Amino acid sequence: MDGFREELARAVEADLEPAAAPYRTETIEALLHCIERLPDKLKRVVRAGLGGDKSADLADELGTSVGAVYNLHYRANKLLRTCLQKEIG
Amino acid sequence: MDPDLHDLLAAWAGGDLDADRRAALLRRVAADDGFRRAFVAETQMLSMLKAVQSAEPRWPLLEDELGGGPPSASASLEDRVLRAIDAPPGRRSAVWPWALVVSALVVAMLVPRQAPPPGARPPAEPTSDAPASVGVVLKADGVRYEESAGQRPTEGGPLRPGPLRLRAGQLTINFVNGVVLSLQGPAELDVASADRVFCRRGKLRTRVPPGAEGFTVVAPGSAVVDLGTEFALNVAADGKAEVMVFEGRAAVSVLNAAGHTLSSEERQGRAALEIDPSAGRIRDVAAEPERFVPAAALVPPALVLDPSYPADVVAARPWGYWRFAAWAGGVVPNEVAGRPGLRTVGGVGLDGTAVFVAGRPGQYLLLDGAWAPPRATGYAVEVWALSQGFQHSSLVALSPADSDSDRHAALLEFTGRSRALLHEECAIRCLDRWPAGKNGGANAFSSAMYTPNHWHHLVAQLGPAGLELYVDGKLAGTAPPCPAPGTGPCRMVLGRMKDQPDADPRQIRSLVGRLGELAVYDHPLPPETIRRHAALRAAGAAPK
């Protein structure tokens, strides 16, 4: 972890545990259902993110810009969070 | 999407940003709560997705995440995501324990490389604990931690998942599954669970008892799975590793960058191997045990109490008090005149404490008479106890003298790690139950694990407020009173749950360890008396 990541990790430390606290086994179960419901394009973005694909490569593949790929990631995560909230009440 | 968030995530993932831009982002993270939370939410989702996407999460993926390097393109993650998505519910459930571990690790390990702030609380005391503990520290010989270490467990203190960074010394850990691991600094170890650790560099040695086979040590480019008993591993900074199997069996693997096994070897008995991940090679070498971490010498400490201890117990008016200093005709005398002694059965050793050794479940002590604990007004059982490991073991068991000894009226015991029982793991439990039976009653559990190979002062008592469990002088657990009135003359068995045979060892719960200074009272003890008794362990003899 380089200095930037260390400094960033320190800065968000206090927020991490509260953020993690609501996530339980049922949450992860729900997350799978939510992934299933994502539009195909967003599923592709999620897969690419997990696979470590470079954003530039994915942008090429999808015929869009790197910024748009980041926006798709952001949108996918937002949809997943919203879906999770509904699933677990 | 906020462009700053975009850039921050890109930089977090290893993207190029100039120093000024990074500094500006860090300033915003520090100043803007909403921005900071948005970043955490994004990384949190990534962690969860990573946890979910793999039925068999592999350390290199964690390494990728934590180390900032790109995940391996060779892993067919898309397939694995799809597998997770398409898996039927029953299939999915199998991944949860791993998924939770991974998720917890990612969160836990994002943060820890920093020194605690000045004035921060020192690491937990022996009896402090949290549900996340996976073991306790048995010994810390000359241990010095790196300033950046995430946790700095002290002797007798809990160990939690996360990084351990040793600058020097030898740390010996007892995991809840009974695995004993000695780590010698300088070393970098990441604890994933009681079953799995990641050694970035350093020397370690493990002893894996029956039932914990499969304990795995992963290193950069290699892994060793203990299939029973004992091995040591030295991991160099360049990833080269040396393994020595001292006893039992171990499987050694070379892994590729994605964590998949390239080749593996299994060795039984005394053998030494060298692993070179860059060459993808495992080869036998001459065994040089002196190159490895020595086995931890875990000699049970003596129970040394202040000379005033016996008088203080007598002053508290016990119904019975047994000191285990001597015996005559196989009976340990009662220090209270006219009251029955304890009959030794199965060759219990006596050296000032009662010694119960492994492999002899027939050892126990039996009250040579009966005691009727006055449940209406309260009673107390006080004892010093040491367990040599995490094992479900009965210390004191009371059952009506006129019934089978597996119908209990009261129990004091160490619990172990068992998925088959509802009891909390590796805690201390006391039970009050009337009418005596095989289930029901009131249970009080300690909130902290006990520490193997350490003496604990225990008091289990029923008082007006209910059942109370004191550990080392502190109230550690309570339960409402069992409402049924009544009592009766009881037999008392020490070191075993019952004196009758049972083919199922879980129903015998024999102690491997020691008991000392047992006293039972026809009344509950005041908290100040309990605190005083616990504090009478001689200076320097108490757990650190």
Image: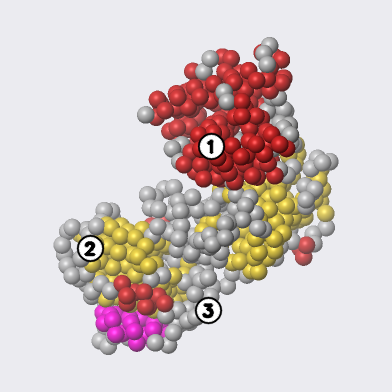
Gap between marks 3 and 1, in whole Å?
A: 50 Å
> Which structural element holds mark 1?
loop
State which tag comes first along the sequence, 1 or 2.
1
Q: Quadrant of the N terminus of chain B?
A: top right
Instruction: Please tell me in which quadrant of the rendered image residue B300 appears.
Output: bottom right
**Circle 3 marks a residue in which chain?**
B
**Residue A19 picture location, percent across and down:** 48, 38
Q: Residue at x 43, y 37 (%)?
A: A22
Magenta residue span: B309-330
Residue denoted by label 3: B540
Residue denoted by label 1: B32
Give left or right: position of B527 versus B541: left
Question: Nearer the viewer's eye, disc 3 or disc 1?
Answer: 1
Question: Nearer the viewer's eye, disc 1 or disc 2?
Answer: 1
> Which structural element holds mark 3?
loop
**Residue B241 picture location, percent across and down:** 77, 50
Amino acid at dot 1: Asp
Residue denoted by label 2: B465
Please report contact status of discs 3 and 1: CB closer than 8 Å, yes or no: no
Between B435 and B382, the one lying in front of the other is B382
State which tag comes first along the sequence, 2 or 3.
2
Gap between marks 1 and 2, in whole Å?
A: 49 Å
Q: Is residue B312 found inside the magenta-colored segment of the image?
A: yes
Residue B403 visible in this rendered orientation of the protein = no
**Circle 1 marks a residue in which chain?**
B
Amino acid at dot 3: Gly
- 3 and 1 marks on the same chain: yes
Please report contact status of discs 1 and 2: CB closer than 8 Å, yes or no: no
